[in-house]
């Protein structure tokens, strides 16, 4: 008895890459826009001496950077898993 993997089971890989790429684009565009807004709020609040808003702006900047890093890492990980699955 010989057992072989079903290579036809992964037929939607090209569509999956397109969907993940499109989602990555949306996430990165929104992250950059929010980064700009948060940086402006941080700068204006710091120059006016409003420390509560400055802390919120700084937190927004850090969250946006973290979201962009996680989105890029998720795309890299997804491509690695797809490539690994194609080698099986």
Image (cartoon, rainbow, N blue to C red):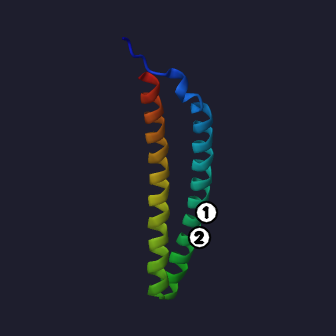
Query: Which residue: 50% across, 21% down?
Result: 7
Quarter of the rendering occupied by the N terminus: top left
User: Horizontally, is 13 left or right of 77 in the view?
Assistant: right
Q: Describe the element under mark 1 as helix, strand or loop.
A: helix
**Local crowd at mark 1 within 10 Å, few (<14), some, or many (≥20)?**
few
The residues bearing labels 1 and 2 have C-alpha atoms spaced at a distance of 6 Å
Residue at the disc numbered 1: 33
Q: How many marks?
A: 2
Residue shown at the point (63%, 46%) measured from the top left: 22
Residue 48 or residue 56, whichever sits in front: 56
Q: Quadrant of the C terminus?
A: top left
Rendered view: 71 above or below 12:
below
Question: Mark 2 — residue?
Answer: 37
- For the point 48% across and 22% down, the residue is 6
Q: Residue furthest left?
A: 1
x 46%, y 46%: residue: 74
**Location of residue 87 in the rendering, given as x and y in whole percent from the top left corner:** 43, 22
- Classed neighbour count for the residue bearing mark 2: other residues with Cα under 10 Å, few (<14), some (14–19), many (≥20): some
Regarding mark 2 in the picture, which secondary structure is present there? helix
The answer to whether the residues at label 1 and label 2 have Cβ atoms under 8 Å apart is yes
Residue sitting at the far top: 1
Q: Is residue 2 depicted above or below 88 in this figure?
A: above
Q: Position of residue 79 (x, y in %)?
A: 48, 36
Residue 51 position in % (x across, y down): 44, 86
Extreme residue in the bottom direction: 49
């Amino acid at each position: 008895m010989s057992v072989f993997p079903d290579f036809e089971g992964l037929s939607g890989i090209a569509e999956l890459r397109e969907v993940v790429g499109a989602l990555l684009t949306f996430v990165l565009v929104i992250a950059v826009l929010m980064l700009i807004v948060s940086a402006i709020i941080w700068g204006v609040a710091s120059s006016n001496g409003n420390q509560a808003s400055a802390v919120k702006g700084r937190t927004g900047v850090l969250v946006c950077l973290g979201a962009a890093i996680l989105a890029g890492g998720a795309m890299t990980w997804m491509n690695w898993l797809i490539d690994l699955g194609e080698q099986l």
